[in-house]
Amino acid sequence: MRWSLFDEIIQMSFDTLRGNKMRSSLTVLGIVIGITSIVGMTALIRGFDQSLRDSIKSLGPDTITLSKFSGLSFAAGGDFQALLMRPNMTPDDATAIEREAPSIAIVDVTLGAGGQATQERVYYKNLRSKRIQVFGTTERFADVSRVRIESGRFFTSGEVQRRRQVVVLGQTPAQALFATTDPLGKIVRIGLQAYEVIGVADKRPSPGGFNLGIDDFVVIPQTAYQKQFGIRAFTAGRGEMRSITISAVPREGVDRATALREVENVMRIRHGLRLDQPNDFDLVTQDAILELWDQISQATLLALVVISSIALMVGGIGVMSIMTITVTERTREIGVRKALGARRVEILWQFLLEAVFLTSTGGLLGIVCGSSLGLAVHLITGFPVSLPWWSFAIGIGFSAGIGVFFGMVPAIRASRLDPIEALRHE
């Protein structure tokens, strides 16, 4: 192959593309759609992935969460009925962990979190909020969950013990009810029960600043929560679902593996488990959540690639059809080139590079459209986006690969034409 002919072949490919604008546009449309979906969705998924990871890390890398079951159990193939028969967490479990696990510094109990979340409207005079989550916690909730108080204070252990009807508002209900007034000391109603506002939580970190309802909550003492919503938190209650979780923070300088082992041992003893029995509770850490999210995001990205490949396949079939028609239309040209000394490999490269040039053009247009789509979504909604260089490389690689794969058959057909028969072609 005379490499000096590559410039000439590329120029001929460009002239062919420019001379048949409509046909070329329809040919690469499937390629453009496929690459647009790959680049655009990759930008959104990667952007959300990075923002979610940052948000999870900001909640505390060493915090250990105990629950009856979690998404980790379902990811491991757990049966729902079997998981439901597990004992619920209780405040006594939290007390035992605090007393018997020396590596644990802070323990908190949260009622109303998880799959069976409690949601109510908050009322103030003639105003009301949308339905938001109601958490019943101890006085240590702010320390464990790293919620900062914007104004006022959090409730004390004495207020928890005496079932005081006090509340700390999240940013969403605070803005909905007290946009122009100071909420501290005001009496609001959560459902049918009146509570005094003693504090307002600061805005919590949200993935990419995108509004995911992370500030849609109020926090009340867990004893007041039990009284209002009739939760029997101090009984294990196998076979019934309660939204009770325990959060534990290790002491500074303590290895997390040591803390996990101590918490696990305390809970196994309390549940009377033998050495050969598996845990009947879930221990969740930041690493476990990130590992589960990795599985979800990878599966989503794989599904995206498969779906986009269908559009690329359709585009590739279109390229093959058009290149076959092109070979037929240019049979005399092939005959003339062969009569003047062109070899089979040069004819092969001519038509193969035309197909690659055609699909690569579609790939470049797809990258531009996909990037523009991601940026437009970010500007309109604030959804986080990320445009990694490898997504562009995949786009170009896929489109060029489609050109090689589907352009090979027409190119081989063109290179095998007999020059005499080609010259006689009408």
Image: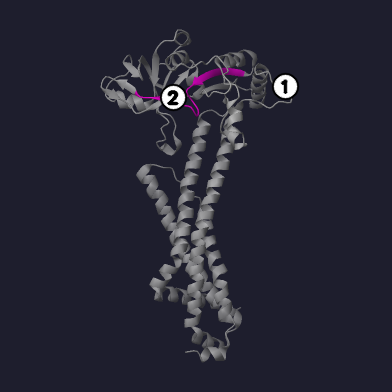
- The local secondary structure at tag 1 comes to loop
Image quadrant in which you'd find residue 218: top left
Kind of residue sitting beneath label 1: Arg
Looking at the image, is 386 positioned above or below residue 23?
above
Disc 1 target residue: 274
Image quadrant in which you'd find residue 202: top left
- The local secondary structure at tag 2 comes to loop
Looking at the image, is 316 positioned above or below residue 171?
below
The stretch drawn in magenta includes residue 114? yes
Horizontal side, residue 347 vs residue 210: left or right: right
Kind of residue sitting beneath label 2: Thr
Residues at circles 1 and 2 in contact by the CB criterion of under 8 Å:
no
Disc 2 target residue: 118
Q: Is residue 234 visible?
A: yes
- List x then y, in percent, for residue 351: 53, 76
- The structure residue drawn at horizontal position 44% and vertical position 16%, both measured from the top left corner, is 225
Range of residues picked out in magenta: 104-121
Q: Is residue 287 visible?
A: no
- List x then y, in percent, for residue 70: 56, 30
- List x then y, in percent, for residue 127: 27, 24
Q: Pointer 2: residues within 10 angstroms few (<14), some, or many (20+)? A: some
Specify which label sits upstream in the sequence, 1 or 2: 2
The stretch drawn in magenta includes residue 1? no
Alpha carbon of mark 1 to alpha carbon of mark 2: how far? 35 Å
